[in-house]
Structure formats: C-alpha cells, structure tokens
Amino acid sequence: MRAVLIVLTLATRIATARPGNQPSVPATDEKSSLLAVTLPLGVTLASVIALVPPLLDEGGDPGELGYFALGGLFIGPSLGHAYADDWAWVGIGLGVRAAAFGMIMSGTHGEYYPEGCEPDFDSPCDQASGSRMLATGGLLLFVASTLVDIAHAPSSVRKYNREHRLSIAPTVTASGAGAMLGGSF
C-alpha cells in the first residue's frame, strides 16, 4: 500500500510539472552576469578617470598612477571573462588591445615621419597622414575591443553556469522510489 501511495504521489508531481518548474539546485559557484559586466566596466571607467590628470599635465611624466591606469585600461575589460573562467576570451581581448596599443605607439612615435615632420596630429606634412591613420585606427581598435569584451562577458557567465549545473529529479523504479542527482561539470 505504501509503495502505491509513493508511486501515485510521484506520478501526480510529474504529471503536474511544467517545463520551467523542474527542481534544480543552483551550483555553489554560480556566477553573476551583473558582476561580469560591472567589474570590467568599473575598472575601465576608474582607469579612464585616473588618466585625466596625467593627460592634462603636458610634457610631464604620467607617474605611477598613470601607468597603473594604463594597465587598468589594458586588463580591465577582460576581467568579466576571467571571472567566468573563459580564458580564451581573456587572451583574445588582451591580444587585440596589445596590437591596438602597438598601432597607436607606431603611429605617434614611429619611424613613419619624414625628417622635419613632427609626430603630432597638427603636423602640416602630407607624409605624416599615414601615421595619423595608423594611430587613429589603433585607437578605434582599442575602444572596440574594450566594448566587445565588456558586452560579451555575460555570455561567458551563462556558458559557465550552464556547464556547472546540478539537478535533482524524482525517480520511480520497480523496486521503489527515490531521487536522481545529475549535473554537468
């Protein structure tokens, strides 16, 4: 009699279950999409704000804060992917920003300027336009890489959470009833 009651109870629970109502136990290390966006966004914005004083000080050394802020601009956007353990995207983001930084440095301080031309954007030399284009392209690539890294971080978190899920479901067998534990790691 007891076995019949258990089977009927489980059958009723299974029959009334809706697709979105499956019993699921969140993994203890489930990641937050909100944190994956706010962490890199906060570090990147703080780095931009910290760079303002060194940029306003013409000809001066940026100092430790300026170098620290440059590091934050370089690494900060990838923190969301690092949080989600998506190291492939971390490497892609850092690699693209390193290439963009190289383009900026080559365009502003490179050997593309003929003798007598100044490495700035106000130079009257027509030959310097290629260097200006290189620096501008590098700056655009750096900004685009930063935005893509920050915007893609929630996708990495969803992938992480999908791969680290734990579920509990009722199970009925000929010898009795119980619960089944399943997960993906």
Image: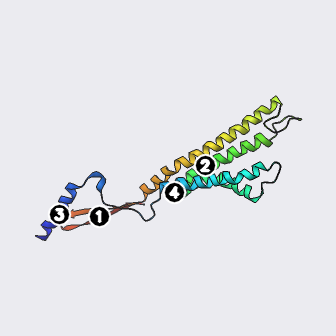
Specify which label sits upstream in the sequence, 1 or 4: 4
Q: What type is the residue that disc 4 sits on?
A: Leu
Q: What type is the residue that disc 2 sits on?
A: Gly
Q: Is residue 64 left or right of residue 161?
A: right
Specify which label sits upstream in the sequence, 3 or 2: 3
Provide the secondary structure element on which disc 4 rests: helix
* Near-viewer residue (135 or 62): 62
Q: Residues within 10 Å of mark 2 (few under 14, many from 20)?
A: many
Q: What type is the residue that disc 1 sits on?
A: Met
Q: Residue shown at 12%/66% (left/top)? A: 4
Q: What type is the residue that disc 3 sits on?
A: Thr
**Distance (Cα) linking label 1 and label 2:** 41 Å
Which residue in the structure is indicated by mark 1?
180
- Which numbered disc, 2 or 4, marks the residue closer to the eye? 4
Going by the picture, which residue comes out furthest to the right?
A: 116
* Near-viewer residue (127 or 73): 73
**Distance (Cα) linking label 2 and label 4:** 18 Å
* Near-viewer residue (87 or 27): 27
**Distance (Cα) linking label 3 and label 1:** 16 Å
Q: Is residue 97 left or right of residue 166?
A: right
Which residue in the structure is indicated by mark 2?
93
**Distance (Cα) linking label 3 and label 4:** 41 Å
Going by the picture, which residue comes out furthest to the top?
A: 126
Q: Residue shown at 42%/55% (left/top)? A: 162
Which residue in the structure is indicated by mark 3?
9
Which residue in the structure is indicated by mark 4?
35
